[in-house]
Amino acid sequence: MFLNSLPTNFAALEVGQHLYWQIGNIRLHGQVFLTSWILLGALLVFISLGTKKMENDPKGLQNLLEFLWDYIRDLARTQIGEKVYRDWMPFIGTLFLFVFVSNWGGALIPWRLIKLPSGELGAPTADINTTIALALLVSLSYFYAGLSNKGWRYFEYYVHPTPIMLPFKILEDFTKPLSLSFRLFGNILADELVVGVLVFLVPLVLPIPVMFLGLFTSAIQALIFATLAAYYIGEAVEEHH
Amino acid sequence: MLAFNFFGATEGGLFDINATLPLMAIQVVALTYILNSLFFKPVGNVVEKREKFVSNNILDAKNKLSEVEKLEADLLSQLQSARSEAQKIVSEAENESDKLYKEALELANNEANASKEKARLEIENQTSSAREQLFKQADDLSELIVNRLILEK
């Protein structure tokens, strides 16, 4: 009753509403793809601008991209180890960049100004499909990494250090993607909801610190996702004696 | 309007999983390949080339430094040996000159002694001959005196 009397035209909150695209009998969440294409397009434009003219003395954008590259290499190297980090660095870096760009893009760009027939634009990572897709890719990656590096010996990991660990290690294979996907999904969705509700209730000043907190959370979540993915891959390729 | 529509809806909801999932996975894999060829490879090449260049330069400088140190040590030892050789030559020359001086001194002393001795002998001879002559003249004189005294008487 009370809520209905508030002016709601500037900040309507929609949760669980999607813009459906129908292709044959396949249904897609259109808003996720729209925002992801816009953000990834911007990312690719940014990167191609920075790598257009590579010089030995880096300047401007190239400097920034080299810093980013170095950051991702350090992340991959510390988690995966010196031996195979090179193979997995692009994947880890892509995860980091995708999640980071999605989170920050969702938080920084005023998507709400664009009206959709149903649902609303927002961070692609606030959709459970995206986060599960990322988490399953991580699972596939660490299985592939373990099997391709150690062959069948990879399964020694399940009985290491004692066979008692077997059920827990098997359970871990399910909890890893579950925790990865839900952590990211929950954090980003919660951030969007908190900002949305605050904007809805107190449209001035008050949401700003929460928005900054949201930016912080977004960056941290990207780092956590990439670090954990690298850690799982590192765990799978690690040689224990 | 607030529409919290979590579960139960036949359409929509927060946990509505559909074909978005596999398509998003394919999109991320494609993005991995695109970013690898557009970002990770070229930037990695440049950065690693530069790292190699820097480490090569450091290695080069270290080699050169060790070479310089070797040369310096070599020079120092050469200098030291030259110095000691010079010292040896100087002391040898000093000894030689000392010896020569002593020899010359001895020679001169001997000569001087010999000539002194000769002179003394000569003086002695002359003294004795002069004395003899004196005695002789004294004898002659006395004889003369005696003769004269005798003759006058």
Image: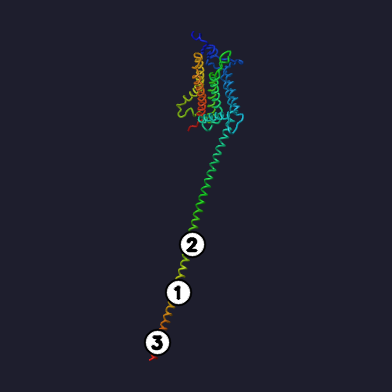
Seen in the image, is A3 located left or right of residue A26? Answer: left
Q: Which x, y percent locates residue B45? A: 58, 32
Closer-to-camera residue (A92/A140) = A92
Residue annotated with mark 2: B97
Mark in front: 3 vs 1: 3
- The label on residue A136 is none
- The label on residue B119 is 1
Provide the secondary structure element on which disc 3 rests. Answer: helix
Q: Is residue B33 visible?
A: no
Provide the secondary structure element on which disc 2 rests. Answer: helix
Give the amino acid at mark 3.
Answer: Ile
Give the amino acid at mark 1.
Answer: Ala
Give the amino acid at mark 2.
Answer: Ser
Residue annotated with mark 3: B145
- Kindly give the residue lying farthest to the front in the view shown: B152
Q: Earlier in the sequence, mark 3 or mark 1?
A: 1
